């Protein structure tokens, strides 16, 4: 929000006599906004109230324009820029930003633990939580995008200190429909050229039956009347070639390794790497899902006891006040 400032204040020394006129009132030793002081004439006659002596002045006092009124300016829609981060790359290098996307319906303590561990690992300078926009392909996702965004903001700003580099982006929640992954990352890169983005995935995305190379995007050249088959185009191969992937090990979802590929990730793309903790640190993982939170609140009619400790207190209050998931 932009605010117009008042004109510089003028100080009236305490040594000057208090003055009252029909135009203005000036108290000794105080400030008057936007109006300069004027002289007090010696011919004035004092009147004592027993505690304070006042002086009535018949001198001509200039009339001053009232100070400008505070004006609210509607905030413009923005996306977090590189300058927002408390940690920045050194030696002119790009800042490494890990994009942690999801529905966050709602955001849980496990989401926040994962985000903080990415920072602790040193694999990224910042982590941006990116709640997805509306998903027509997921009819069960009924919570409005703006509410999920608000819950993420409440969580991040009440759990982490202001200096901790975990943030929330609204780039997708302001869209009419959630962006496909490749489109989302290319938009972020265009808006933040001084950042290098990686996309956070779990090892469950590297199992048989899933193939990132087959992920699609909207065909922006498609027009009504054209074949529905042409409405989407495959961009997964470009996604794997152009962007880094940070893989988080999920319990029960192992990736086979070979002598030629000890990480097991080369088979999926050239820019995948495991989230690895520094020496003497063990990655703290959680298996709490948003689905479990929603299931526990269903039909509770305001009784949120079963999700105490599973979501931040502020998020719990938001859920209760908004009657979400009940």
Image (cartoon, rainbow, N blue to C red):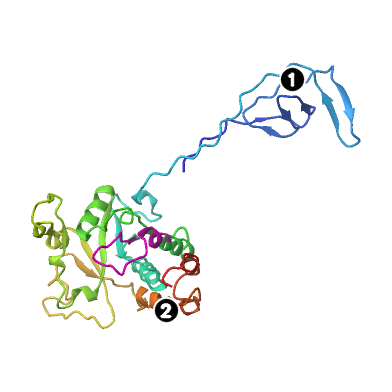
Q: Return the mark for residue 292.
A: none
Label 2, secondary structure: give it: helix
Q: Position of residue 69 (x, y in %)?
A: 56, 34
| Image: 77 above or below 36 | below
Q: Nearer the viewer, residue 306 or 13?
A: 306
Q: Which residue is mark 2?
A: 296
In the rendered structure, the answer to whether residue 286 lies left or right of residue 47 reads left
Residue displayed at 41% across by 63% down: 152
Residue displayed at 13% across by 80% down: 258
Q: Nearer the viewer, residue 299 or 238?
A: 299
Q: CA distance from mark 2 to mark 1?
A: 73 Å
Residue displayed at 29% across by 81% down: 251
Q: Return the mark for residue 39.
A: 1
Q: Position of residue 39 (x, y in %)?
A: 74, 20
Q: What secondary structure prevails in the magenta region?
A: loop
Q: Which one is in front in this view, the residue at disc 2 or the one at disc 1?
A: 2
Residue 132 inside the magenta-drawn segment: yes
Q: Is residue 166 visible?
A: no
- Count of number-bearing discs: 2
Which mark sits nearer the N-terminus, 2 or 1?
Answer: 1
Check the image and name the residue furthest to the front: 225
In the rendered structure, the answer to whether residue 306 lies left or right of residue 9 reads left
Q: Is residue 119 visible?
A: yes
Residue 67 inside the magenta-drawn segment: no
Q: Position of residue 84 (x, y in %)?
A: 39, 51
Label 1, secondary structure: give it: loop
Q: Position of residue 269 (x, y in %)?
A: 14, 67
In the rendered structure, the answer to whether residue 65 lies left or right of residue 91 reads right
Q: Residues within 10 Å of mark 2 (few under 14, many from 20)?
A: some
Magenta range is: 130-150
């Amino acid at each position: 929000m932009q605010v117009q400032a008042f004109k510089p204040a003028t100080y009236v020394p305490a040594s000057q006599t208090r003055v009252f006129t029909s135009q203005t009132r000036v108290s000794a030793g105080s400030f008057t906004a936007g109006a300069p002081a004027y002289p007090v004439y010696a011919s004035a006659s004092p009147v004592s109230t027993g505690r304070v002596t006042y002086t009535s002045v018949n001198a001509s006092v200039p009339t001053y324009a009232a100070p400008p009124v505070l004006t609210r300016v509607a905030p413009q829609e923005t996306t977090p820029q590189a300058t927002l981060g408390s940690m920045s790359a050194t030696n002119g290098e790009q800042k490494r930003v890990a994009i942690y996307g999801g529905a966050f319906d709602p955001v849980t303590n496990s989401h926040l633990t994962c985000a903080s561990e990415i920072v602790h690992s040193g694999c990224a300078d910042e982590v941006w939580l990116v709640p997805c926009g509306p998903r027509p392909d997921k009819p069960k996702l009924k919570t409005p995008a703006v509410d999920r965004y608000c819950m993420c903001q409440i969580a991040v700003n009440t759990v982490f200190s202001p200096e901790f580099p975990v943030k929330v982006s609204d780039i997708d929640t302001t869209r009419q429909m959630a962006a496909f992954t490749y489109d989302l990352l290319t938009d972020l890169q265009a808006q933040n050229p001084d950042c290098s983005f990686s996309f956070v995935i779990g090892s469950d995305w590297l199992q048989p039956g899933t193939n990132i190379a087959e992920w699609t995007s909207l065909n922006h050249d498609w027009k009504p009347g054209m074949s529905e088959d042409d409405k989407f185009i495959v961009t997964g191969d470009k996604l794997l070639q152009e962007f880094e992937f940070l893989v988080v090990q999920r319990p029960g979802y192992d990736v086979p390794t070979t002598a030629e590929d000890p990480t097991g990730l080369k088979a999926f793309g050239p820019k995948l790497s495991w989230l690895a903790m520094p020496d003497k640190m063990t990655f703290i993982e959680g298996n709490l899902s948003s689905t479990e939170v929603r299931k526990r609140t269903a039909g509770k009619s305001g009784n949120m006891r079963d999700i105490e400790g599973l979501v931040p207190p502020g998020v719990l209050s938001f859920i209760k006040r908004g009657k979400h998931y009940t």
